[in-house]
Image (cartoon, rainbow, N blue to C red):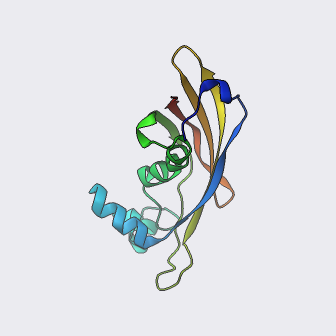
Amino acid sequence: MSFSIHELSPGQEIGSRTIGVTRTDLVKYAGASGDFNPIHWNESFATSVELPGVIAHGMFTMGSTVQLVSDWAGNPGAVVDFQTRFTKPVLVTDTTGTDVPGATIEVSGIIGKLDAEANTARIDLTVVSAGQKVLMKAQAIVKLS
């Protein structure tokens, strides 16, 4: 989709989605990113360093959530900035051999601000897993057409 700034207003919803996360997803992400830290795949190691279990990579979480904005914009290249603060880890339980995700991430977005001079929209995302906000101040800047 391509939007004109005149078609949009602050507070307008851009959509929402649920992202299922499995440990297989984390292993695939580790291979793609080169981040093989065992806290992202090894339960006994994760608990030995006082984590509650295997946790998703922060960049996996961030990248998965910004997809909502890319899809809304209709062009990933329109997302010119994305920033967030990591507040809680996404705990991914072992559901290997089932179709059930080990965690879910709920993401929703609204237009937070429009900048007519720059022809951009700031999208504010709410990102929750297991009832807790896992990203704070998750904001993407989208260049409008």
Residue 129 image position (x, y, % from top left): 62, 58
Q: Residue furthest top?
A: 117
Would residue 36 be visible to someone looking at this image? no
Residue 13 image position (x, y, % from top left): 70, 41
Vertical arrangement, residue 53 with respect to residue 72, above or below: below
Quadrant of the rendering where the N terminus is positioned: top right
Residue shown at the point (54%, 43%) measured from the top left: 69
Whether residue 112 sits left or right of residue 43 in the image: it is: right
Residue 17 image position (x, y, % from top left): 62, 56
Residue shown at the point (69%, 58%) measured from the top left: 131
Quadrant hosting residue 12: top right
Residue shown at the point (42%, 62%) measured from the top left: 49
Vertical arrangement, residue 65 with respect to residue 113, above or below: below
Quadrant hosting residue 76: top left
Residue 39 image position (x, y, % from top left): 40, 63
Residue shown at the point (51%, 79%) measured from the top left: 95
Q: Nearer the viewer, residue 62 or 7?
A: 7
Vertical arrangement, residue 20 with respect to residue 81, above or below: below
Q: How many marks?
A: 0
Q: Residue furthest bottom?
A: 97
Would residue 71 be visible to someone looking at this image? yes
